[in-house]
Each structure stands twice: as C-alpha cells, then as structure tokens.
Image (cartoon, rainbow, N blue to C red):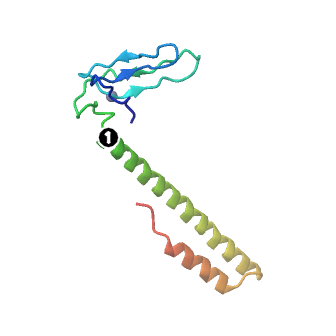
Amino acid sequence: MSAPKKQADGFRYYNVWAGNPKGRKGDPARCAEEISPNERGGAAHCYQCTRKAVVGEFCRQHSPEAEAQRKAVAHARYTRVTRGWQRAALGREVIAAAMLWRLGTGTLDALGAAVDAYNATQEPE
Ligand SMILES: [Zn+2]
C-alpha cells in the first residue's frame, strides 16, 4: 500500500517525476493508492487507482485491512508449505535410517531418533 503524501492544499499528487514535477492532482473520490505499472518498455508512469474510495480513502483491494489480511493469508500458506516440506524431509530421514539399520550400518537408536524427530512435527493443517 502506498499513497503519495497529502500536500498543503489537502490533495495528493500522482505521477510526480523529473519530467512532471507537479504531478497530477488526485481525485479525492477515488482510491488514494498510487499504482506503479510494470517498468517494461521504460515509459511507465504511476497513476492513481481508478476505483472508488469506499474504505476510508481506499478501494476494497487497497484498504490497509485488506492488505493486512492478504499478507496474513500468504504468511499462513507459507508456514503451512514450509512445515510440509520439513515434515517430508524428516520422513525421508526415517526411511534412510531404517535402510541403514537393515543394511547393518545403522543403529536402532538412530532410527528411533529419526522417528522421534518426525513425530515431533505436526501434520500441516
Ligand atoms: Zn485502489
């Protein structure tokens, strides 16, 4: 979320850059978010979000609450996926320890430790 600071006249100004130092006066009825288009092609300029301001000064997509919620959902997904990977890796350790034990080069203690480590992880919800 980023919106240009309000200036002394109470308005936000968009697409302020060296070639357009005053920028474009923002429309207070629209979402205050400043959108940065992809820089591909070089001639990219920022502009004010075109949606109506319905949550404070922002649209539904750019409201701080919505952004915080999206972040929390992404973080939860990241945690879930990472835990799944960790659990899978520990599962492979159990199999490796079992194979070593079967070959006679591993110990039951090592296998037990691998099983304990695996059991200490929680199944991802
Ligand atoms: Zn917006």
For badge 1, the amino acid type reads Pro
> Which of these two is toward me, 104 or 1?
1
* Viewer-proximal residue among 3 and 91: 3
Instruction: Give the percent coordinates (x, y) of residue 11.
Output: 29, 23
Image position of 46 with respect to 83: above or below: above
Question: How many neighbours does mark 1 have within 10 angstroms: few (below 14), some (14-19), or many (20 or more)?
Answer: some
- Residue drawn at 48 percent across, 23 percent down: 37
Ligand 1 within 8 Å, label 1 CB:
no
Q: Nearer the viewer, residue 91 or 76?
A: 76
Report x, y in % for residue 49: 35, 23
Q: Is 101 above or below relative to 33?
A: below
Please name the residue shown 66% across and 82% down the image. 110
Residue 96 occupies which quadrant of the picture?
Answer: bottom right
Q: 7 and 64: which one is in front?
A: 7
Find disc 1 in the rendering and name its residue.
64
| Residue under the image location 25 percent in, 24 percent down | 52
Q: Is residue 65 left or right of residue 115?
A: left
Residue 113: which quarter of the image? bottom right
Vertical placement of 1 versus 99: above or below?
A: above
Q: Position of residue 12 (x, y in %)?
A: 33, 24
Residue at the image point whose x is 52% and y is 24% from the top: 38
Q: Quadrant of residue 114?
A: bottom right
Q: Secondary structure at mark 1?
A: helix
Q: How many marks?
A: 1
Which quarter of the image is occupied by the C terminus?
A: bottom left
Residue 116 lies, in percent from the top left, at 55, 79
112 on left or right of 11: right
Indicate which quadrant contains ligand 1. top left
Quick one: quadrant of the N terminus?
top left
Left or right for 70, reference 19: left
